[in-house]
Amino acid sequence: MKVSDIKEKLNLTCAAGEGGLDRELEGCYIGDLMSLAMTGVHEDMVWITIQTNINVTAVASLADAACVVIADRAVPDEATVKKANELELPLLTTEMTAYETAKALAALGI
């Protein structure tokens, strides 16, 4: 499944990084503590968080995550959007909680 598929099926909004929507997905990590995310997020994963600062792009890029889903109506700041666009890292936003997002991804087989 591709990032574009979950965007469409879960009605997510792409806040940045549209160039990376064709990436394939392999698993999911949920967490807001950056130090844990640095060890838990892996290549081609969806990372669900409520964090919105530029450190999200650094951790996701370091791990080569496929995308970041920012849950709970949180909105990334301007610097984060700019960096995500440079990296072609999709930042997807949703009104769902992290738990609801994870359940929806699991229902899709992620």
Image: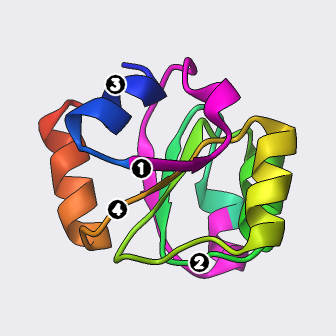
Residue bearing the label numbered 1? 13
On screen, residue 88 above or below 69: above
State if disc 2 and disc 1 touch (CB < 8 Å): no
Q: Which residues are magenta?
A: 13-37
Q: Residue at x 77, y 65 (%)?
A: 80
Going by the image, does 104 lie left or right of 48? Answer: left
* Sooner in the amino-acid sequence: mark 3 or mark 1: 3
Mark 4 vs mark 3, CA separation in Å: 15 Å
Label 3 crowd bin: few (<14), some (14–19), many (20+), radius 10 Å: some
The quarter of the picture where residue 76 lies is bottom right
Residue, x 83% and y 49% (percent of image)? 62
Q: Position of residue 6 (x, y in %)?
A: 33, 34
* CB-based contact (under 8 Å), mark 1 and mark 4: yes
Mark 4 in CB contact with mark 3 (< 8 angstroms): no
Mark 4 nearby-residue class (10 Å; few <14, some 14–19, many ≥20):
many
Q: Residue at x 83, y 69 (%)?
A: 79
Q: Secondary structure at mark 1?
A: strand
* Quadrant of the snapshot with the N terminus: top left
User: Who's the residue at 85% across and 54% down the image?
Assistant: 83
The three-letter amino acid code for the residue at tag 2 is Gln
Q: CA distance from mark 1 to mark 2?
A: 16 Å
Which of the labelled discs sits on residue 5, or is there none? 3
- Is residue 21 magenta-colored? yes
The amino acid type of the residue labelled 1 equals Thr
Q: Tell me the distance, in whole angstroms, between the alpha carbons under discs 1 and 4.
A: 7 Å
Q: Earlier in the sequence, mark 1 or mark 4?
A: 1
- Residue that carries the numbered disc 2 in the rendered image: 51
Circle 3: residue type: Asp
Provide the residue designation for mark 4: 94
Secondary-structure class at tag 4: loop
Q: Are marks 4 and 2 in contact (CB under 8 Å)?
A: no
**Left or right placement of residue 100 versus residue 4 in this view:** left
